Amino acid sequence: MARILAPNASPMTFRGTNTYLLGEREIAVIDPGPEDPAHLQAILAAVPAGGRITRILVTHAHLDHSAGVPALKRETGAEVLAFGTAEAGRSAVMQRLATEGAIGGGEGQDLGFAPDRLLTDGEQITAGDLPQALEVLHTPGHTGNHLSFALGDTLFVGDLVMSWATSLVSPPDGDLTAFLTSLDRLAARDWAVLHSGHGAPVTAPRARLEELAAHRRARHAQIRAALEEAPGSARQLAARIYTDVPEALLPAAARNVLAHLIDMHEKSQARPRGPLGAEAIFEPR
């Protein structure tokens, strides 16, 4: 396996997007990363002499993971495999909110992404010339179309789990209910290592999965307590709760809070005053 780091460092992408190459002579690429000529050349240069890229696997349709697909496909002719387009895999609740149009979101979505073939949960696929098949896991939460790819006890987990930060969950593409379900699903299996879309490998997977789930549930309780003190919008609650977060990151924090509020609304723990939307004022139930 080779890992190529894209030159797209930012507060949301850490040091950049990780692109993974699997195989020796027939290569599968996981997440070609952003549209960047230098990164494309780095991927091509990492292919061994006499080798070729035959498949491009995409964990999810965010621009920092999938925008590099068209150029890599043009260079190699490789087949592109993913769960679906940027809007695929949304729950009924999130699809309704997206249709109503008042929920906002859409940060970083690659709306032009279109895979050659759709993958399904539990499917076994060949990856380059590896002797072992990859298992496809549908792991929504960060986005509805998010996939993870298991190679034995090694999991390529995209942006669902990272060692350096928690994932952005921004409705309607991000879904906190689905996110927690995906974490619980992964925690039920024994993994040796998780290779993330950003940052270093997670070498203590169970502990990290449990930590992320506990963090979300603690945040849930924190939001509930803040609502008991005074009603507020996602943006107002984020400002009250995320007191140690730089101001530039508060919009992302507000999207995470909104994801919690929607989950609480569906569980009859909170309700908006008026229609459910990004700027709705919520109160406890």
Image (cartoon, helix red, strand yellow):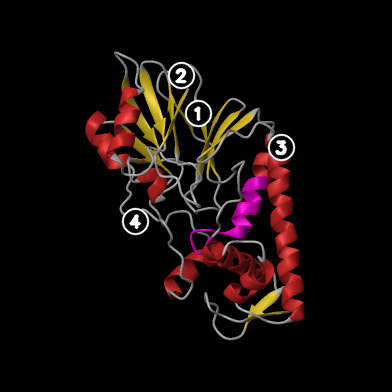
Kind of residue sitting beneath label 1? Leu
**Viewer-nearest residue: 274 or 241:** 241
Residue position for label 4 = 111
Kind of residue sitting beneath label 2? Leu
Label 2 and label 3: CA atoms lie apart by 26 Å
Dot placed on the residue nearer the N-terminal end, 2 or 3: 2
Q: Which stretch did the figure color magenta?
A: 170-183
Dot placed on the residue nearer the N-terminal end, 4 or 1: 4
Kind of residue sitting beneath label 3? Arg
Instruction: Inspect the magenta stretch and tell me whether residue 56 lies in it.
Output: no
Residue position for label 2 = 130
Label 4 and label 3: CA atoms lie apart by 33 Å
Q: Are marks 1 and 2 in contact (CB under 8 Å)?
A: yes
Residue 249 seen in this snapshot = yes
Label 4 and label 1: CA atoms lie apart by 26 Å
The mark closer to the camera, 3 or 1, is 3
Label 3 and label 1: CA atoms lie apart by 21 Å
Q: Residues within 10 Å of mark 4 (few under 14, many from 20)?
A: some
Residue 188: which quarter of the image? top right
Residue placed at 52% from the left, 74% from the top? Answer: 278
Label 4 and label 2: CA atoms lie apart by 31 Å
Q: Are marks 4 and 3 in contact (CB under 8 Å)?
A: no
Q: Residues within 10 Å of mark 2 (few under 14, many from 20)?
A: some
Tag 2, which secondary structure? loop
Residue 206 image label = 3
Kind of residue sitting beneath label 4? Leu
Q: How many marks?
A: 4
Residue placed at 61% from the left, 59% from the top? Answer: 176
Residue position for label 1 = 134
**Viewer-nearest residue: 266 or 259:** 259
Q: Are marks 3 and 1 in contact (CB under 8 Å)?
A: no
Q: Please, which residue is most extreme toward the bottom here?
A: 274
